[in-house]
Amino acid sequence: MKILTRPQIIRRIEKINERLESYYAKEKEMMAAKGIQSYTIGSRTISRYQYSSNIKEQIEKLEDERDELENLLNGIRPRKAMAIVPRDW
């Protein structure tokens, strides 16, 4: 991630929060009565939610990104990755 200024971080967090609200609204709509689909085969009936795993994945991804940006805003820097190569001399 490139180095961002404080106003840039705040703007990104606001945009992420807006997108999250949209995804939460869609998720709520899908879990409501409109999101239930019923199937009938012969004498058997099944009802299930039409829940898209893509929405769940996007929500988790956006929440993680928001958490990272909030940590940057609070001064907590991400860890640096380091590799250690063992050598036998």
Image (spheres, rainbow, N blue to C red):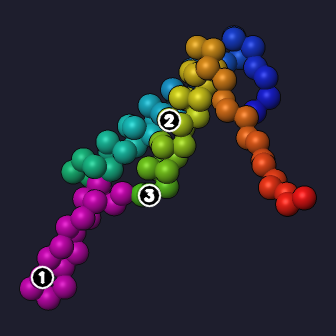
**Disc 1 marks which residue?**
44
Circles 2 and 1, Cβ within 8 Å, touching? The answer is no
Looking at the rendered structure, the kind of residue marked 1 is Arg
Residue 47 colored in magenta in the image: yes
Quarter of the figure with residue 88: bottom right
Looking at the rendered structure, the kind of residue marked 2 is Glu
Q: Secondary structure at mark 1?
A: strand
Nearer the observer: mark 2 or 3; the answer is: 2
Front residue of 21 and 1: 1
3 or 1: tag closer to the N-terminus: 1
2 or 1: tag closer to the N-terminus: 1
Looking at the rendered structure, the kind of residue marked 3 is Ser
- Range of magenta residues: 35-51
Q: Secondary structure at mark 2?
A: helix
Instruction: Report the residue at 66% width, 23% height from top.
Output: 77
Image quadrant containing the C terminus = bottom right
Q: Secondary structure at mark 3?
A: helix
Nearer the observer: mark 3 or 1; the answer is: 3
* Side of 57 where 43 appears, left or right: left
**Disc 3 marks which residue?**
53
Quarter of the figure with residue 21: top left
Image quadrant containing the N terminus = top right
Instruction: Report the residue at 44% width, 57% height from top.
Output: 53
Q: Would you call the spot at circle 2 few (<14 residues within 10 Å), some (14-19), or many (20 or more)? A: some
* Side of 88 where 44 appears, left or right: left
Front residue of 80 and 30: 80
**Disc 2 marks which residue?**
63
Tell me the CA gap for discs 2 and 1: 40 Å
Main secondary-structure element of the magenta-colored stretch: strand
